[in-house]
Image (cartoon, grey):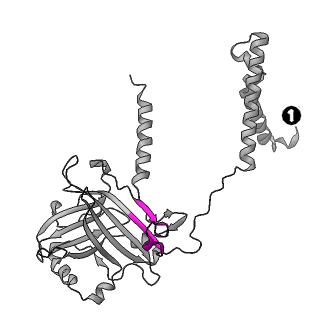
Amino acid sequence: MPAPRLPRTLSALLALTSLVSAVTLDCADIVVDKQRFDLSPLKGPHSVHWLDDSSPSITSNYTFTIDICAPLQRTKGVDKEEECPHGTRVCGIERDGDGPKIVRVIPIAGNYEHDYGRPLDPKITRLKDSDSHADASKEGLRIELHGGKWPFEEKGNKGHQQRALVEFICDAERDGLEGDEPDKREKEEQAEALERRDEDDKKKKDKSLKVISYKFEGDNKVGVLRMEWRTRYACEKAGSAVPAKSTGWGFFTWFIIILFLAVASYLIFGSWLNYNRYGARGWDLLPHGDTIRDIPYLLKDWARSIMSTIQGGGSRGGYSAV
């Protein structure tokens, strides 16, 4: 039957609305523990090259690209298999040593809810409120992003879950773009990327965005990328606190509530009285039912008299024809 379609449609719309609110990260208006942060000046893709030399025999060469404000865009001239899927916010690419050959592409975090049912599910924490003693002295915020998996195409529980932990640390002397490595993933620019990897330690320290580690953690072997981003936009500025919402109701709200309750009580009591005393039914149950039925006509007559007064105010100068 066609009748149930409306409730199903409304349910779908409500579910979609809640879903959008759940997976969206508005970098221009982040509110955590009554503090507001605007990270929009850091928008756009930023790449960091990192060598994993934890293994004595194998050194892994990674390029991590992040856009905290929007999904990463496709790179012109690069095969689809050499990039993370649409919706990715944090992408990792591992290469074979110093060569350009790509070993694997790792979608670490992104919103893949529409195609794969994997939401971004951002979790934001104020560093001062962290349970860690080391974070208690820091000013800034931590953003945890989810949705990634590798291999990404594996269905069910196969593959390793991924997530990104990015700590935005307050540094009044930095805008967050110092030592920035733009997103240059085109094949012909790999040589330049490898040269940047061999910069001296002093220059590396000047970079605002750094990779702390990427490794599998926990019993479930979740791939966790930890990054640090020093920027003035993570500082808690005076006046950026979100004012507390008033918990009390104003006079006008109470007036409306009391008026509604008074009218409802009058109608209910009057209907009960007419039913028990006179055996009234239908419209006759309501007190002053005749007057209530005449309200539309009274309003129409009142509006007509108003229009007549307005239109006839300047005609004939107050005289009528004899």
Quarter where residue 228 is shown: bottom left
Quarter placement of the C terminus = top right
Residue drawn where x is 23% and y is 87% of the image: 199
At 43% across and 74% down in the image, what residue appears?
134
Nearer the observer, 137 or 162: 137
Magenta span contains residue 132:
yes
Residue 143, quarter of picture: bottom left
Say few, some or many: other residues with alpha carbon within 10 Å of mark 1 (under 14 / 14 to 19 / 20 or more). Answer: few
Q: Residue 254's spot in the image, x, y percent?
A: 73, 44
The extreme top residue here reads 279
Q: Amino acid at mark 1?
A: Ala
In the rendered structure, the answer to whether residue 41 lies left or right of residue 62 reads right
Indicate the position of residue 178 as horizontal and vertical percent values.
Answer: 36, 82
The quadrant in which the N terminus is found is top left
**Residue 178 sits above or below residue 162 on the image:** below
Quadrant of the rendered image containing residue 260: top right
Between residue 78 and residue 242, name the one nearer to us: 242
Q: Residue 165: x and y, percent? A: 35, 66
On the question of residue 225 being in view, the answer is yes
The answer to whether any part of residue 75 appears in the image is no
In this rendering, is residue 199 above or below 278?
below
Q: Please state the total of marks drawn on the protein image.
A: 1
Secondary structure category for the residue under label 1 = loop
Boundaries of the magenta span: 119-143
Residue at horizontal 81 percent and vertical 43 percent from the top: 313
| Viewer-nearest residue: 302 or 265 | 265
In the rendered image, residue 224 lying in the magenta stretch gets the answer no
Q: Position of residue 153 (x, y in %)?
A: 19, 52
Please give the name of the residue rendered at 41% of the width and 29% of the height, measured from the top-left corner.
Answer: 5
- Residue under circle 1? 321
